[in-house]
């Protein structure tokens, strides 16, 4: 895959891996992840968000089968997985500021508790930023009084 070439004097250098600091690196990586795991997402048992993979299933046997399928796709493309960052067979987990379980989807209460501790915005720009953080209906219904 052609990522980036740099001409330096009489030599041309080409990266073999995506370097840090490249503007389109995250978009390139996310597109690659979406392409590699498109089938699993369409089948409805996996969610991909940038570099997070969430696999969910109804039975332990299905879960093991899904994990095996994902790992078998990672090996040929040299996609590394850090076991320290993996959690297998969880009944509930925190993902993107939400507590996700088989029974519910709720906002992480640590995030909700942090809202009153934030300083009061003093400029229109800071106010817009604060309102942007509270923009979703699920978030505002638990934080702001109705």
Image (tube, rainbow, N blue to C red):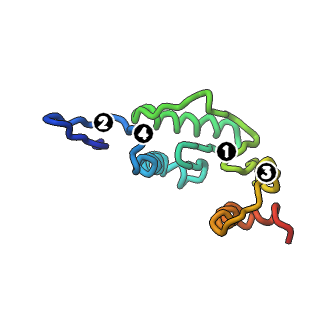
| Percent of width and height locating residue 42 | 53, 55
Q: Which residue is mark 1?
A: 57
- Sequence-first disc among 3 and 2: 2
Determine whether 22 is above or below 122 in the image. above
- Sequence-first disc among 4 and 1: 4
Q: Is residue 129 visible?
A: yes
Q: Do callouts 4 and 1 mark residues in contact (Cβ within 8 Å)?
A: no
Which of the two marks, 2 or 4, is nearer to us in this view? 4
Which of the two marks, 1 or 2, is nearer to us in this view? 2
Determine whether 128 is above or below 47 in the image. below
Q: Residue furthest front?
A: 122
Which of the two marks, 3 or 2, is nearer to us in this view? 3
Q: CA distance from mark 4 to mark 1?
A: 35 Å
Q: Which residue is mark 2?
A: 15
Q: Which residue is mark 3?
A: 114
- Sequence-first disc among 2 and 4: 2
Q: Residue furthest left?
A: 10
Q: In the picture, which quadrant includes the N terminus?
A: top left
In this rendering, position of residue 46 left or right of residue 120:
left
Q: CA distance from mark 3 to mark 2?
A: 42 Å
| Percent of width and height locating residue 97 | 70, 50
| Percent of width and height locating residue 79 | 45, 34
**What's the residue at 80%, 66% (across, down)?**
141
Q: Residue furthest bottom?
A: 146
- Give SS at disc 1: loop
In this rendering, position of residue 16 left or right of residue 39:
left
**What's the residue at 64%, 38% (across, down)?**
63
- Sequence-first disc among 3 and 1: 1
Q: Tag 1: Cα neighbours inside 10 Å, few (<14), some, or many (≥20)?
A: some
């Amino acid at each position: 895959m052609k990522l980036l070439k740099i001409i330096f004097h009489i030599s041309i250098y080409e990266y073999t891996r995506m370097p840090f600091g490249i503007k389109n690196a995250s978009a390139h990586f996310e597109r690659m992840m979406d392409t590699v795991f498109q089938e699993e997402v369409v089948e409805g048992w996996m969610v991909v968000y940038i570099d997070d993979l969430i696999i969910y299933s109804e039975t332990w046997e299905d879960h093991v089968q899904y994990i095996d399928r994902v790992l078998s796709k990672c090996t040929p493309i040299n996609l590394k997985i850090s076991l320290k960052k993996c959690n297998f067979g969880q009944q509930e987990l925190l993902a993107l500021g939400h507590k996700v379980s088989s029974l519910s989807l709720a906002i992480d209460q640590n995030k909700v508790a942090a809202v009153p501790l934030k300083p009061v915005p003093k400029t229109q720009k800071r106010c817009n930023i604060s309102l942007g953080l509270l923009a979703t209906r699920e978030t505002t219904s638990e934080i702001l009084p109705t």
